[in-house]
Image (spheres, helix red, strand yellow):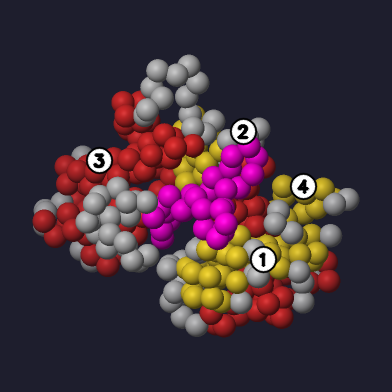
């Protein structure tokens, strides 16, 4: 039998079919499907598109739903695993959505839900950067900032299933308003969404910046790569954006290391594709500011290796 994993993001819904043999998960995605999330919009519409992404993935694998054992979904926000309700997701504008029932009605299969960052952490822990580490953290820089925390081999979620939301710890007192209702959250400074906003702000200050050329003079075409590409081309304004952004990311990572002391901390999301151009300066900040600087063992900071597949694999493992 096969398991479906779904990564429900603020931008895309990605589904994959994970192969299994004799009840043992073999980390092998044999079919994929993707549709746009187009959030915010009614939960019923988004769940209909989750089913659409699943159908595309099942067809891509040459299977039918009769071949599927279960469906797992990683979603932004807090999921009550006792009730199967997504209690809150600021990025999807969900409040008390009966997710398990809705998707089981659509698929006819047992469905399981977990926070998306926790699902990605499970995927990386089992099959990627954290393989073999009992104390592991996965940070995802995407529409928001997700963090999945594994201590002694178990996901930390707390009594309300909302533990480990490091993206909503404050790094700037009275800072930029966050969608969660607080001001100055790490997510408001270190997400890809925040990087795009920072890039646009710098472009408005610097009309001669290379960044304008890279987006064809249309500020609405700015992406998370615009400032990096400008920096690579020798643009000072782009470098200023990237330098500040890397420090914002580093501040949150230092907090995580000081609190949890993981063996491995991996960074995922589209921005992580910048590789060592993103991570080496962050490692330098961590080296200077971590509390454990005199300890013999130090946290390994690395790029997530599964990419977008981490959330899919981790979600499939929920079933």
Q: Which numbered disc, 1 or 3, marks the residue that appears first in the sequence? A: 1
Q: CA distance from mark 1 to mark 4?
A: 27 Å
Q: CA distance from mark 1 to mark 3?
A: 43 Å
**Which contiguous range is marked in magenta?**
142-168
Callouts 1 and 2 close, C-beta under 8 Å: no
Q: Residue at x 22, y 56 (%)?
A: 174
Q: Is residue 159 magenta?
A: yes
How crowded pointer 4 is (Cα within 10 Å; few <14, some 14-19, many 20+) is rated as: some
Indicate the secondary structure of the residue bearing disc 4: strand
Residue 178 seen in the current view = yes
Q: Residue at x 50, y 21 (%)?
A: 297
Indicate the secondary structure of the residue bearing disc 1: loop
Q: Identify which residue, 1 or 74, lies in the foreground.
A: 74
Q: Position of residue 25 (x, y in %)?
A: 77, 49
Q: Which numbered disc, 1 or 4, marks the residue that appears first in the sequence? A: 4
Q: Which numbered disc, 2 or 3, marks the residue that appears first in the sequence? A: 2
Q: Kindly indicate the quadrant of the structure image that contains residue 219.
A: bottom left
Label of residue 243 in the image:
3
Q: CA distance from mark 1 to mark 2?
A: 28 Å
Residue carrying label 1: 82
């Amino acid at each position: 039998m096969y398991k479906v994993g779904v990564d429900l993001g603020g931008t895309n819904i990605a589904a994959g079919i994970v192969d299994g043999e004799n009840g043992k998960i073999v980390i092998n995605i044999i079919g994929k499907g993707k549709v746009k999330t187009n959030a915010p919009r009614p939960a019923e519409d988004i769940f209909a598109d989750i089913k659409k992404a699943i159908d595309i993935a099942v067809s891509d694998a040459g299977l039918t739903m009769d071949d599927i054992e279960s469906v797992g979904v990683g979603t932004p926000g807090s999921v009550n695993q006792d009730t199967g309700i997504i209690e809150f997701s600021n990025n999807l504008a969900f409040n008390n959505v009966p997710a398990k029932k809705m998707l089981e009605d659509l698929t006819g299969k047992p469905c399981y839900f977990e926070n998306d960052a926790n699902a990605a952490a499970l995927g990386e822990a089992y099959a990627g950067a954290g393989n073999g580490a009992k104390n592991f953290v996965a940070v995802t820089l995407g529409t928001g900032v997700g963090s999945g925390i594994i201590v002694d081999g178990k996901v930390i979620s707390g009594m309300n299933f909302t533990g480990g939301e490091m993206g909503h710890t404050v790094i700037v007192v009275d800072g930029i308003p966050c969608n969660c209702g607080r001001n100055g959250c790490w997510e408001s400074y270190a997400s890809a969404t925040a990087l795009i906003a920072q890039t646009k702000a710098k472009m408005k200050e610097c009309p001669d910046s290379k960044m304008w050329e890279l987006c064809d003079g249309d500020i609405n075409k700015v992406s998370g790569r615009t400032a990096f590409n400008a920096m690579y081309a020798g643009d000072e304004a782009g470098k200023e954006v990237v330098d500040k952004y890397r420090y914002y990311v580093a501040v949150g990572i230092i907090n995580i290391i000081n609190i949890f002391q993981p063996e491995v901390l991996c960074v995922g999301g589209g921005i992580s594709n910048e590789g060592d151009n993103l991570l080496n300066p962050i490692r330098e900040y961590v080296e200077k500011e971590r509390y454990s600087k005199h300890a013999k063992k130090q946290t390994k900071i690395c790029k997530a290796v599964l990419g977008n597949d981490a959330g899919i694999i981790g979600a499939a493992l929920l079933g």
